[in-house]
Amino acid sequence: MSEDANYKSELVGVFGHPVAENPTIVMIEAAFRDLNLNWRYLNIEVLPEDLQTAVVGLRSMQFKGINLTIPHKVNVLPVLDRLAPDAKLMGAVNTVRREGDLLIGENTDGKGFLRSLRDDAGLDPSGKRVVFLGAGGAARAMAIELALTGAESILIINRSAERGESLSRLIKENTSCESEYLPWVSGVSFPSDTDVLVNATSIGLFPNVTEKADINYDCISRDMVVCDVIPNPPKTPFLAEANARGARTLDGLGMLVYQGAIAFRMWTGQEPSVEVMKEALESVFQ
Ligand code: NDP
């Protein structure tokens, strides 16, 4: 055996249920190979009742970190040592990183969205008026991050009043951003002075690729940036409507890659190639 032999990989991965179809592994492993890092990303099936022991296992096996997906993003909170302030406000964690022996909860979804807005659409969100369709986990992470970064106002349009009102209240009570809730009626209209419109619902996700949000698309103008969270397929009917009206559009693939790149940097301390990660994902998406 040579003196510098090292057959031990550093470990990260994702806890979920179900977890088999989670594609994050494809982009993270591509980035490991690209940087010649002896790291592995594992998709690990964890039942809700086993989450606590799984987290204890992370410590014993010295994982460098972990992603959380459905149904663990909220339930993991009490098992962690510390939460980043934004993750605490959202009440959800999608990434755990290690700081010495401490397990720190982070949420990179909203940060990935902000990076996509800045880098791909060239838009600085501070002072902007934003409209969200949806008030689920993704909307929560994105809206809170936008509010913390200085957006002027956020209008939440959601089917369930309870979820919509609760997100709007969370923003108003904890940030300097204005926020209101608007019930989602069929063909709902939104203000013409909107700067950014975001579909943060699951409408359009594979295999329901022909579905689109039931809104008044004539409210979209060419001055708006229109974003979709759906990463697969990234070209959604929602974005096609926005393109047809001359608006700039941002797909969900960029956000997915950037949120993964931010977690990658938290774990490894290295900057991955977002191009390599995006190509890897595109090779497996429809
Ligand atoms: P949730 O289940 O937490 O929320 C779903 C949201 O969509 C709710 O607001 C729900 O409204 C709304 N919704 C669903 N169907 C309809 C419909 N037919 N009409 C109106 N509203 C509807 O899911 P998440 O927030 O976690 O995820 C949402 C989407 O975002 C998923 O498709 C996911 O793949 C994607 N995503 C993408 C990421 C990326 O990086 N690109 C990151 C995270 C998520 P209601 O409250 O009324 O039920």
Image: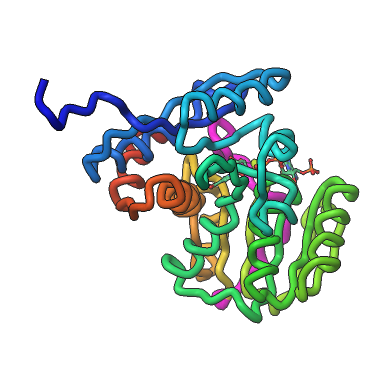
Task: Report the front residue among 272 and 282.
Answer: 272
Note whether 244 is above or below 257 in the view shown: below
Indicate the quadrant of ligand 1 in the picture.
top right
Please identify the quadrant where the C terminus is shown: top left
Please provide percent x and percent y for residue 279.
Answer: 31, 44
Magenta span? 203-223
The quarter of the image holding the N terminus is: top left
Residue drawn at (47%, 24%) of the image: 61
Image coordinates for residue 226, horizontal then vertical, percent: 57, 64
Q: Is residue 261 left or right of residue 189?
A: left
* Residue most extreme to the left: 2
What's the residue at 23%, 43% (across, down)? Answer: 34
Residue 13 part of the magenta segment: no
Task: Out of 16 and 85, give the one closest to the viewer.
Answer: 85
Relative to 196, 115 lies left or right: left
Residue 149 at x, y percent in the picture? 63, 71
In the image, what residue occupies the spot 70% across and 61% down? Answer: 144
Whether residue 7 can be seen here: yes
Q: Is residue 235 visible?
A: no
Q: Residue at x 36, y 40 (%)?
A: 282
